[in-house]
Image: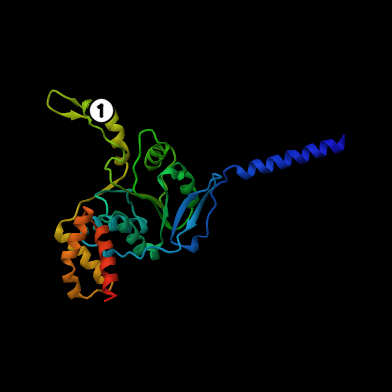
Amino acid sequence: MNEAFERLLMRAEQLIDRIESVLPKPLSEPDWGAAVAWRYRKRSSGHGTLEPVRHLAAMQLDELKEIDGQKEKIQRNTQQFVEGKPANNVLLTGARGTGKSSLIKACLNAYAPQGLRLIEVDKTDLTDLPDIVEVVSGRPEKFIVYCDDLSFEDGEASYKALKSILDGSVAASTPNVLIYATSNRRHLLPEYMKENLSYTHTDDGEVHPGEAVEEKISLSERFGLWVSFYPFSQEEYLTIVAQWLRSLGVADAAIQQSRPEALVWALERGSRSGRVAYQFARDFAGRQSNV
C-alpha cells in the first residue's frame, strides 16, 4: 500500500514539474550592465525575456539633417526625462524613411551616459507591458519603451494594453518609464470613408466625431507629444545624401558629382526619403572605393 502511494506521489510530482516547465514564468531582470538597449522577446513556451542589444546603431544627432524642428522637440523631451523633470510619452508619425526611428536611436546614444536606457517591444507583445514596467520600476535608470512602426487593426488586444498603460490604468504611471512610438498612421488605426457619416453637426455649424472616430483618436491623444515628419524636397534630399557621403569619407568633389545619380536613384524608388538617401550613399561610396 505504501509503495503504491509513493509511486503515485512520485508520478504526481513529475506531472507538476512538467506543467510548471511550460507555464509562463515571471519576467526576470537581465544583467543591466550588459547593454544600454534590450529587446523584449517571447519564446514559444510563453516565457518573456529581455535580450541585450550587443551592436547598437552608431547614430548621432548631428548626423540627422533637415529635421531640426522634430529633433529639437524630441531632444528637449528626452533631456527633461533623464534629468528627472516632467516629460511626455511621444508619438512620431509621418512619411516613411524620414528619420523617426533614427532620431530615437540617436537620442539613446546621446543620453546613455546620463542613464538613459531603451527596451524595444514588438506590437504583438504590448500585452506584456505591465510586466516590463514592473521589472524596471525600481531601477535608477530612465527607460524608453520603444515601439517601431506601430499600427493596429480593430479589436487587437495589444491596442487596449497600450491604451491602458499610457493613461487609464488604476496603477500610477512609473516616473522612470516613457513610451516612444513611431507610426505612419496618425491615429494608429485604419480609417474608413464610411466613418465620416458618423459625424454630427450642431445648429451653429460645429462638427463632432462619432463614437468610432473618437475611439480611434483616443489612443494617439494619450501621447503627450506628437511629432510629425514630412516628405523631403529635392534639395533637402540632396543635403541628406551629401551628409551621408561625407560621413562615409567621400570627397567634396565626388559628392557634387553624385547629385544627378542620387536623383535618379530616388526616382527609381519613388521616394526622396532619408532612408533612400542613406542607401544611395552606401552604394556610391562603395563604388568610389573601387575606383
Whether 177 is drawn above or below 237: the answer is above
Mark 1, other Cα within 10 Å: few <14 / some 14–19 / many ≥20: some
Say which amino acid is labelled 1: Gly
Could you tell me which secondary element the residue under label 1 belongs to? loop
Q: Which residue is mark 1?
A: 210
For image coordinates 45% across by 58% down, the residue present is 140
Percent of width and height locating residue 256 = 16, 71
Question: In this view of the protein, can residue 247 be seen by the observer?
Answer: no
- From this viewpoint, which residue is outermost toward the right? 1
Between 239 and 128, the residue placed more toward the observer is 239
For image coordinates 49% across by 63% down, the residue present is 34
Between 45 and 32, the residue placed more toward the observer is 45
- Left or right placement of residue 81 versus residue 42 in this view: left
Q: Quadrant of the N terminus?
A: top right
- From this viewpoint, which residue is outermost toward the top? 203
Q: Quadrant of the C terminus?
A: bottom left
Between 233 and 85, the residue placed more toward the observer is 233
Between 239 and 144, the residue placed more toward the observer is 239
Q: Quadrant of residue 236?
A: bottom left
For image coordinates 25% across by 63% down, the residue present is 280
Q: Quadrant of residue 191?
A: top left
Question: In this view of the protein, can residue 268 be seen by the observer?
Answer: yes
- Left or right placement of residue 86 versus residue 134 in this view: left
Percent of width and height locating residue 154 = 35, 33
For image coordinates 40% across by 42% down, the residue present is 165
Percent of width and height locating residue 54 = 46, 63
